[in-house]
Amino acid sequence: MATTSEKASKDLFLKTPPPDDRRNRKVEPSARYSIGSIGLFSSLLLAASLAALGLQAQQQHLQQHLAVTDSQTYCYDSVQTLDSDLPAAQCFTVADGLFTAVTQQAQKQELKQRGEHSTAGHVIPGLWDGHGHLIDHGETLVQVDLFGATTLDEVRARLRDYIRKHPGAGTKERWLRGMGWDQTDFGRMPTAADIEQDPALRGIYLFVDRIDGHCSLVSQSVLDLLPNPVPDILGGDVVRDPGPGVFCDNALDMIMARWPRPDDATRAGYVSTAMRALNAVGLVGIHNAGTDPESVRLLARLADGDAWTVRVYAMRECAARNTFCAEDAKMLERKDGRLTVRSVKLFADGALGSWGAAMLEPYTDDPSSSGFLLINETALTAVTRQWAAAGFQVNVHAIGDRANRVALDAFAAALRDHCGVGDKGDTDPAICEHDRRFRLEHAQIIAPSDQPRLRSLRVVPSIQPTHATSDMRYAETRLGAKRTATAAYRMRSFLDLQPVLGSDFPVEPPNPFHGMYAAVTRRSPATGLGRRVDGDGEDEGKERGWHEEEALTLEQALWGFTGAPARGAFLEGKAGQIRRGAYADWVVLDKRLGGPGFDVESLRTLRVRETWVAGKRVYKRDD
């Protein structure tokens, strides 16, 4: 099946990298986000050659839109296009949901004379989150919020307050759901008994997720629905110390099988709520990281409605995780770009915070454990090959270095099937990866010996900058100093692979400007703080960004939320840029993003003025 990118013409590729605007820091040429470098530029030329056959169809499609007479021209104080052919503009014309012309300042007066008007504000292309969870985010916005609860007393207080305001929550038919607790704050895992000790909470049906979504705390009423004794589960963790109540990864299947799932009307409400919240922070598109068959059908139906205001690139997931479901191995690509399904999400391991990431060596703070795989190596390779053979982009959740290694092994096997490419294949991997673009979702801890394999296989890292700044308070405790410094939370090291940036919402807030701040400063966007420097050097005790050697420039971070996710979704030239023929998606800001005098700290408090999708305003700030 021809990919979207194979229908693109040569000029749809960004030909020059964003400039490196950092001061007082040496930047090695090889570390730049340089897709104009020799190797990658050759790959792009090769990709463009493969696209040539589809050029005529692309141009015919564009001409249909250019023929539409109902067009509108918009002019602003500045327009950052992220298109190297015309990086800066002031006006653009929109027809039928596409940009049909982009013009410079010299043409602005002429357009005004034709009756067009200029609007105050500074424009950037519509932003994309490369890894999020749409329906889960909508649910989280209307359920109990446990983020930032630092004691079990505060958790209980928030649960009581929610039940008081929402009569009927916590019943057998309507379990109390929520997210955000972190045992790191409590000094131990919570238990069902911690809930039962509060008379106001005794007997409720509770199912609340840890901050990373890989573990959940349930109440005694839910425990009573399970077999007695509760069995151990391969690829999961039934936490028994200091008491029962927490289930992690594959062990959560027991809970999910008994949870009364919301009906489609309720879940449609979650979608609408989530989309409004995403538009408010400038997001016009997301990569939905895990979409089961029922959810695909729901989204396909909702995508016809006027309330659909976020483009969704959905990763399929079978009803039974980490399997190949032939009856659901169907692609979907709407011509209007509202919904695309051509990828699949698999899971290699759990999360670092709950010791569920699969590691090659034991945890530094728990030498008895190296985490665990959610699927064994042989099975992961087999299911990867099945999905790849069906033409799907395969995206594997991988946190630990062992998980990333087995995912790379699986990708190598699938690429050998597809075109004879492997770690030592004779075929140029750029040929093969052009229509595959396998992805490591999170790519969080990768052994130094495996990092060159990402390049040889042309695997796309999908990275969440705020994970680094959230995890920095305990990551070195889990991993040790050496493993953290050489293997963990790489960003700048992978720039030549065009990493897709995102947030993993609702695990982290979806604000892409917070993601940019974390990527550029390696500090928490919530506090503005990094980590204090230990040791006896001149920087001892100073506050610095965490592993600043992996920081990006603002231009690189912006590309990570625009052009890179477009490429990661086979949408280069259609999304992430303001250029003729691309989707008419843009964001209006009060000030220009970047440039001389720009204060990167302002990213923490930046508020979007307007968000536009397909030439329609979907959000306007209420001042």
Image (cartoon, rainbow, N blue to C red):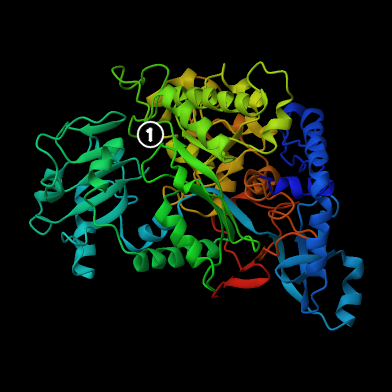
- 45 to the left or right of 204: right
**Residue at left offset 46%, top offset 42%:** 326
- Pinpoint residue 220: horizontal percent, then vertical percent: 12, 47
Residue 527 visible here = no
Q: How many numbered badges does the structure rendering display?
A: 1
Looking at the image, is 257 positioned above or below residue 99? above
Which amino acid, by three-letter code, is at mark 1?
A: Gly
Quarter holding residue 175: bottom left
- 32 to the left or right of 470: right
- Pinpoint residue 605: horizontal percent, then vertical percent: 54, 58
Quadrant of the image for the N terminus?
top right
Quarter holding residue 455: top right
Looking at the image, is 190 positioned above or below residue 536? below
- SS at badge 1: loop
**Residue at left offset 83%, top offset 65%:** 63
Q: 140 and 288: which one is in front? A: 288
Quadrant of the image for the C terminus?
bottom right
- Pinpoint residue 32: horizontal percent, then vertical percent: 73, 33
Residue 4 visible here = yes
Question: Among all residues in the image, which is located at the extreme bottom?
Answer: 115
**Pointer 1 local density, CA inside 10 Å: few below 14, some 14–19, many at least 20:** many
Quarter holding residue 89: bottom right
**Residue at left offset 50%, top offset 27%:** 407
- Pinpoint residue 136: horizontal percent, then vertical percent: 39, 55
- 392 to the left or right of 201: right
Q: Circle 1 sits on which residue?
A: 350
- 434 to the left or right of 358: right
Q: 622 and 100: which one is in front? A: 100
